[in-house]
Image: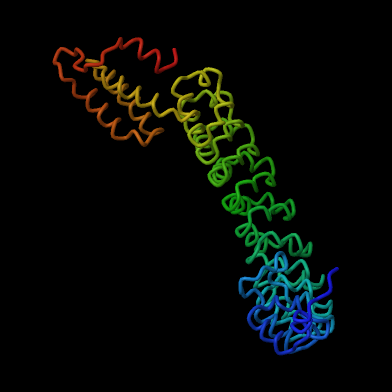
């Protein structure tokens, strides 16, 4: 270890320099001498200004000036209260006695819920403290006493803040429909902690996949075959197609929406749709193929209204998945809906056999 320079030694031991430094950035206490880390005025100024940024890099220790105070000052009530009001998580560096101080712990969890993990066992069973903690950061339900983990109001507050807190609720509350719905609406993956009965609940599963499409993997078989649920899932996360029923993996709209969201979702589609030219073009983001489709569709002149509507639907489909071609799609629709020739013959310079184009577009 290289010896300190004289200027560095003077800085670490000079009281006025260190006091000025911690008033600017509390984490400067890190650099103080052992003697100054036991100086009450300096440490109080440090914890009050903890987290201020002066451009220096204190890495993972950001917001933890109390950590560098002497043991005696980590047991000083005024200093610790000031510290947790600024950064609740620094309760971890307080003395055991102060981790059992109700006012200090309440201030800490109100600032940062995870401070509950450093509170005394007695205060982890204090309803007001635990409720304040889970309202700030729901996952800390894990640190609550068993009695409070079974408190419906506390669990509901926890999952509404952080859905995965459902993991730490007792079985009877995991089976509570309102609690599970609140959890999945916050974090879809919380569905994995629900009982089988609620994994089959349509509203709950729909709420989960709207929040996180991949939550479909935790649903029962029935919702995986529900078109609305699967469509919502793949629109949120294309690869959720992997968990859809075989029938819905062959649903063109569902597969197109999945591939639009995530091109790699194509691997989960039915074999027929994997070979569909338009589906493959969407997966590869082949705008030129889509542009050519619009050009050719615009040149078709069906005389039967139902056939015109079918062509317009295909044009709309292209515009939906390739929005950059919206203007071209409008032109193609106008050409299809308003043929220039009364006898239904083509008026475009570019002509091709309609039946052959239909086969190409549909992947026949």
Residue 339, horizontal then vertical, whole percent: 18, 20
Q: Is residue 206 above or below residue 36?
A: above
Q: Is residue 28 above or below residue 204?
A: below
Horizontally, residue 222 falls left or right of residue 279, namely: right
Q: Residue 191, located in which quarter of the rendered image?
A: top right
Q: Where does the C terminus fall, quadrant-wise? A: top left
Most foreground residue, 183 or 119: 119
Horizontally, residue 307 falls left or right of residue 285, namely: left
Most foreground residue, 121 or 18: 18
Q: Residue 244, located in which quarter of the rendered image?
A: top right
Q: How many marks?
A: 0
Q: Residue at x 61, y 74 (%)?
A: 54
Q: How is the image coloured?
A: rainbow
Residue 4, horizontal then vertical, whole percent: 81, 76
Horizontally, residue 278 falls left or right of residue 163, namely: left
Q: Residue at x 69, y 72 (%)?
A: 88
Q: Where does the N terminus fall, quadrant-wise? A: bottom right
Residue at far left of view: 342
Residue 106, horizontal then vertical, whole percent: 70, 76
Q: Is residue 11 above or below residue 183?
A: below
Q: Residue at x 30, y 9 (%)?
A: 353
Most foreground residue, 317 or 138: 317
Residue 47, horizontal then vertical, whole percent: 70, 80
Q: Residue at x 77, y 73 (%)?
A: 123
Q: Is residue 248 above or below residue 137?
A: above
């Amino acid at each position: 270890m290289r010896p300190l320079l004289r200027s560095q030694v003077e800085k670490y031991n000079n009281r006025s320099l260190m006091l000025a430094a911690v008033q600017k950035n509390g984490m400067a206490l890190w650099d103080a001498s052992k003697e100054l880390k036991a100086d009450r005025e300096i440490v109080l100024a440090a914890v009050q200004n903890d987290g201020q940024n002066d451009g220096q890099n204190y890495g993972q220790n950001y917001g933890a000036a109390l950590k560098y105070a002497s043991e005696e000052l980590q047991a000083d009530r005024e200093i610790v209260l000031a510290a947790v009001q600024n950064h609740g998580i620094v309760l971890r560096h307080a003395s055991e006695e102060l981790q059992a101080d109700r006012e200090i712990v309440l201030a800490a969890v109100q600032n940062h819920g995870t401070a509950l993990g450093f509170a005394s066992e007695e205060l982890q069973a204090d309803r007001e403290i635990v409720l304040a903690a889970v309202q700030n950061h729901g996952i800390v339900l894990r640190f609550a006493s068993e009695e409070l983990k079974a408190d419906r109001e506390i669990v509901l507050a926890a999952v509404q803040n952080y859905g995965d807190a459902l993991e730490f609720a007792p079985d009877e509350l995991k089976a509570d429909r309102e609690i599970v719905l609140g959890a999945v609406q916050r974090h879809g993956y919380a569905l994995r902690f629900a009982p089988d009965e609620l994994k089959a609940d349509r509203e709950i599963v729909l709420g989960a996949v709207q929040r996180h499409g991949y939550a479909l993997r935790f649903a029962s078989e029935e919702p995986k075959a529900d078109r609305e649920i699967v469509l919502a899932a793949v629109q949120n996360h294309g690869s959720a197609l992997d968990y859809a029923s075989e029938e819905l993996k062959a649903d063109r709209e569902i597969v197109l929406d999945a591939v639009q969201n995530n091109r790699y979702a194509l691997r989960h589609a039915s074999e027929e749709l994997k070979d569909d030219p338009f589906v493959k073009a969407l997966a590869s983001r082949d705008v030129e193929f889509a542009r050519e489709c619009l050009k050719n569709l615009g040149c078709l002149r069906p005389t039967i209204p139902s056939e015109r509507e079918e062509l317009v639907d295909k044009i709309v489909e292209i515009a939906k998945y390739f929005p950059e071609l919206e203007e071209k799609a409008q032109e193609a629709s106008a050409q299809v809906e308003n043929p220039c020739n009364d006898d239904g013959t083509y008026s475009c310079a570019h002509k091709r056999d309609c039946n052959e184009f239909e086969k190409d577009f549909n992947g026949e």
